[in-house]
Amino acid sequence: MSDEGDKSGEGERMVLKMLTGSQAVAWAARLARVDYIPAYPITPQTEIIEILSEWVRKGEMDATFMQVESEHSLLTAAGTAAATGARVFTATSSQGLLYGFEMLYSIAGWRAPLVLVNVARALAAPITLEPDHNDVLAARDSGFLHFYAENVQEALDLVLLAYRVAEDHRVLLPAIVNIDGFHLSFTRERVDLPEQDAVDEFLPEYKPVNPIRASKPVAKGIPVLIPPLYSFFKYQMHMASRNALSVFREAAKEFEKTFSRDYAPVEEYMMDDADTVVVMSNSFASAGKYAVSVLRGEGYKVGLFKIRLFRPFPTDDVIKSLRGKRCVLVIDQNISVGKGGIICPEIAEALYHLEDRPKVILPVIVGLGGKSISLEEFRHAVSVAERLASLGARPDGPLLLFREDEAILVESLLKIASGG
Amino acid sequence: MERGHIFNPNYVLVTSPSLLFDPTVKPLDGMVEGSVLFVNSSKDVPIVDSKKIRVIYRDVTDLALKHVGKDILSATMGAVACKLSGLIGLQSLVDSVSEELEELGLEPELIEKNIQLAKECYSSVESISLCGLEYRPLHNVVEVRYMGERGIPDLLSMGNTALRKTGSWRVLKPLIDRNLCTACGICYIYCPESCISLDEQGYPLINYDSCKGCLVCAVECPMKAIKAERESVWS
Amino acid sequence: MSITKYKTLKDVPREEFLVSGTSLCAGCGALLVIRLFHKALGDNVVWVNAAGCVTLMATFPYTPLKSSWFYTAMGSAPAGAQGIRDALDILIKKGKIDPTENLKVVVVTGDGAASDIGLQSTSGAIHRNLDFFYLCVDNEAYGNTGFQASSSSPIGSGTTTTRPTHLYPMGNFLPKKDLFEIWRSHRPPYVATISPSHVVDMFRKVEKSLNFKGPKLFLALSPCPTGWGAEVSESVKLARLAVETGIWPLKEAVYGEVTHTYIPPKRRPVEDYLKVQRRFAHLFKPVKNEGAIAEIQKQVDEYWSKVVH
């Protein structure tokens, strides 16, 4: 890839560039001066490891790039390297994340911080390349911190923030930064690329705890067969993850000072006087913001609430932003088959005990396997929620959004498939 | 009715007296007044924290050696538990032992030996009915605090298994006859447990705290200088 | 063999890296192999483990090892070794840690992990020429879960998933996977079979392997009295019998070139080895299965007929 950009003068701490999401997270790994990049190709992640491999081979990055034979080995090597004291970056997608899934819990249990970029892609079967969030949300309970990026700039910045939070000794947990396949990974956007010295200032060297050394033997990952001990260690992981909320805020403050971009665990969009709030995460939140701005023009008092940090779950931010609202629609781009969306119950639980909780919390499922979310669908969902609120009725299961033209398309394709 | 972990047992059966004092086992935890402790031991062992529990000592290992020729204790302890509780009759016990050992693929004669063993163990104790024994809650509930780096499951104390005293596993004890020993060091080489060291003259020393009594040393000794003796009492 | 410091058992170093008190069974062949292998390797070792019996050597808060240990997962210990090796290399290269902090990275797994679930990971690590040791303690079944068949279980052996019945009189009717040849086909610098009975042979092999950079792979016969149904005192004797009957050839391969390091002068009949183990008892009782025993003998004889003396 090309390295040229608009360098706007020596005093500046960043350079303007047009980057894809893949390039942006590769740049973040480079700027974080990672030591180790275990890799395995999978669409739509592959571009990230291609870029990093080239930089390492050209000597532009002082890191070891190691292509292994599967994601299971990839995650194993990533975890043991981090536990040995290397700063580790890796990336995968979808089936790859699931293939290595066992190791996610292990790496978190080893308390080995590293950053894994997941380029979201819906899960087989049926197999597809387009994104939704069932892959990354399968890792929800693993102990990984979850950072969700809406745009290419955020993708880059969240990788840097993720290292800082994950490696903090109050946390010591690995992190996933999710970027949606195609929508971010292959989309070029304008990015402020930080200068190396600024990143060095923001991100101190990784100081591992109990790394494996000749002078100080250690046993890691060993069985804990005594039930109270097992409970104890899992509780400790949970508390460390909760610590990440304040560590993230601290880090974000530092980040803002250095790079003039402000990140909170959540983001509010046109929410000041909103009655109805759409909850979203990741890249499709941009479509949500567009819809909100149009619906505002049509007289809907609607806003958008975006989750950027999903683990640890930002309960206080959810309460602060959503209490007193009349309707909340949670748009889940995932499906827990037989139940509904995965994020909606978490929002509902956070609000349950409030006197001024929303009258309606409407679960909405849309955007599976990369299906677009149109303005009409947003409008429809908002009006369903508002109608339920005025009737005092409860939602009858999740709202599964689909458009007529899409139904016609599906019908025609089924016809071809059946030969009918 | 308790299932899984028994917090307040009426009956506790301990296969080796050494387990009474093992910090990871703690078999006496939760025993309440009037409950029964059975210890597989030929001698009485002082029970430090004996409230008013009834302690019974029998050497069922001896019975196992007599009937089966091996220190396999599952049938013995099962039989004792059946009898002590008075809940399971002799025929049910015999049927269960037979069925379970058949499933393991044991030969009929070995199964028969185990049945005889179970029968003798069954008759070696009396039933002690503990209906109506009263339980009281023994534990406070606490909140776990965040412990920082101590909350990471890394182990930093290396080579500490010797604390576990696996010598308690031993039924047969290897004894070296210094008159026959030629200090060849073969027993030292082949001890799987690092339990044999060599003194300055090259003569072997056995660490009986840890020796599990596998007797690989006795089989490998070219001078037949290592004899096996039934362990009297483990201390 | 080239110049070696190991001439007799007297040359075995006294230093112990593995203290007593593990929770492994009395008479465990794998434990003896690990103890001796560690003496041959010396200090500054990190063991990388996949699920198996030896995983239970270290259970919180105890470890018998004076050296480091990392339990990874059943399927990917070699990848775990990759991460540690690569991390140590780059941290030393970048000057972040002192070169004296370097460690020999040693994978230790059972035969289930080595031959079945972890074979892909092993193949990958060998192919990448990872500088590591791999010690497979082969007890020829999934011992830790109660002795189910693995692809390393020998033909004719009974396990809890290959019980001999009237429909399956042989017990396990599949052949033992030839892990030595699978490893050798990658042409790594060093592959060897070892036995806890032949200690000088083992020490010389480890000594030799220390000269190579890249994968150094050891397949150790590890008698399992519990699973094999043998006297606990006879683990070493059984291992010796396996060698003397020719069932367990002692050999090495340097960059793929095979040499047998010990050729039994007069091979004992396989029956001597089989009849003392309960896992083969069905070949002898209630009626002797002459055909099956002859078939096992034939396979051993055929193997040795191809060995260049």
Image: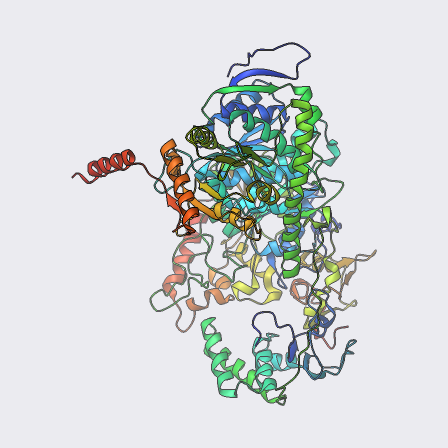
- In the image: residue C143, left or right of residue C4: left
Residue C183 visible somewhere in the drawing:
no
Asked if residue C239 is positioned above or below residue C287 in the image, the reply reads above
At horizontal 50% and vertical 35% (from top left) the residue drawn is A304
Q: Tell which of B58 and B208 is nearer to you.
A: B58
Q: Tell which of C10 and B126 is nearer to you.
A: B126
Q: Position of residue C114 (x, y in %)?
A: 51, 47
At horizontal 67% and vertical 10% (from top left) the residue drawn is A10
Q: Position of residue C299 (x, y in %)?
A: 41, 53
Residue C264 visible somewhere in the drawing:
yes
Q: Tell which of A370 and B121 is nearer to you.
A: A370
Q: Tell which of C92 and A32 is nearer to you.
A: A32
* Residue found at the very far left of the displayed protein: A420
* Residue found at the very far right of the displayed protein: B200
Q: Quadrant of the N terminus of chain B?
A: bottom right
* Residue found at the very far top of the displayed protein: A9
Q: Quadrant of the C terminus of chain B?
A: bottom right
At horizontal 41% and vertical 74% (from top left) the residue drawn is C286
Asked if residue A282 is positioned above or below residue B171 in the image, the reply reads above
Asked if residue C125 is positioned above or below residue C16 in the image, the reply reads above
Asked if residue A349 is positioned above or below residue B79 in the image, the reply reads above
Image quadrant of residue A368?
top left
At horizontal 60% and vertical 11% (from top left) the residue drawn is A7
- Which scheme is used to colour this image of the protein? rainbow
Image quadrant of residue A309?
top right
Q: Position of residue A17 (x, y in %)?
A: 54, 16
